[in-house]
Amino acid sequence: MLLSNEINLQQAYEDQENYMNLNENNREARTSKLSQQIDRHQLMDLKIGYAFKQLFGKEHHKDMITAFLNAIFDKTEIAPIQYLSFKNIEIAGEYEDGKEACLDMLVETEDKESINVKIQFTNQREPKKQSLSYWSQLYQKQFEGNKDDNEFNPVVTINILNFDLIEDDDKFHRIFRLFENEKNFWLTNMLECHLIEIPKLIRAWKQEALNPWEDHLARWLLLFGIVDEWENYFYDDIYQELEKITSIDKTLEKAIEGWGNLSSSKEARLIYEARLKQIFDQQSLLQDIELAMQKCEVLERKYEQQKIKTAEQKKKWLEAEEKSVTARREAAKIIIRYGKIVARNLLEQGMDSAFVRNAT
């Protein structure tokens, strides 16, 4: 009987070990499957608006964008999302004429609160003005239906930046609202602006200051930061870490699989490459304009300096001319005075006036 129990116990241990090995093999197989879908270094940069919108702006991917927004809202007082609908599903023509791809949504939370949300990836240097512009557009649209004031929904804008905006600060996610200056209470909840700086996120990752296993927002933002087309860099360590996290996050797994499928689509790749080229061309043009303006400023400063120098030289010339005229006048006075003295002396010596006039 004792021998039988020992055999059963040993069998149980073996079964448990086999089970754990099987789970580990399944995880490795799943990770391998994700990696083999496409060369990971060919993955699209999700900070390009087109790629983000093609992946997250689809009806069958609502669970992915909902998970991301809930991770954002978890940093605020907004309740989790219960329902989400897209408001602007455009074709590729949206990306012409330098337009960025925005993703507009109307969400309803578990608290039955309706909120308009706009997500924007920007590479421009005026995201503050841009964010307020987008907010005002969304808010203004609500007036078109002559709604009652009580029916207006709050507007939340989420700007994901590929550059540092706020200097001397390492915080990569900031939330802005309308507050009273002294008492620090809300004027209204109608405006909420999120600014997310990806370079700061990457620095936090390198400093091991992030834990995407626990921080859901860091998890999604790191997904956006894996590919950096501007630096031509792929963060393989982040990719591998997120692949591991897919063992506990099926929505993230779905996002990575969808990302691979999107990146391997020839049609999507053509549009993506065209959009990427357009962005780089725009940035190059803006840099050329900025450089030209800097040169103009230098030339204007030199011109002003030359004007000042010329004015100073003219002033000196006028002063010299004035001194010369004064000197000539003084000389003339001296000559006249000297002539009078000579004439007087000649007259005193008995010379007639006609001789004196000719002599002086």
Image: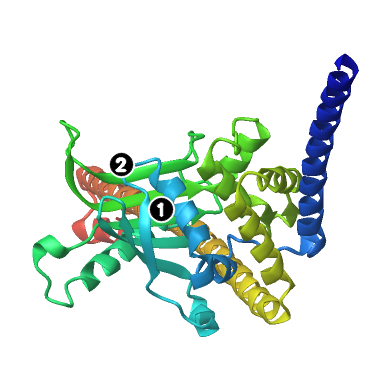
Residue 246 seen by the camera:
yes
Residue 212 vs 253, above or below: the answer is above
Q: Residue at image x 56%, y 49%?
A: 220
Secondary structure found at label 2: loop
Q: Please, which residue is most extreme toward the left here?
A: 148
Q: Is the residue marked by circle 2 packed among few (<14), some (14-19), or many (20+) residues within 10 Å?
A: few
Secondary structure found at label 1: helix
> x and y percent of residue 231 in the render?
70, 54
Q: Amino acid at mark 1?
A: Ile
Q: Which residue is mark 1?
A: 308
> Foreground: 334 or 268?
268
User: For residue 117, which quarter of the picture?
Assistant: bottom left
Residue 240 vs 152, above or below: the answer is above
- 250 relative position to 83: left or right: right
Q: Residue at image x 32%, y 47%?
A: 79
Which callout, 2 or 1, points to the residue nearer the camera? 2
| N-term-proximal mark, 2 vs 1 | 2
Q: Which residue is mark 2?
A: 77
Q: Please, which residue is most extreme toward the front here?
A: 1
Q: Amino acid at mark 2?
A: Glu
Marks 2 & 1, CB-CB < 8 Å contact:
no
User: For residue 179, which quarter of the picture?
Assistant: top left
> x and y percent of residue 146 in the render?
11, 75
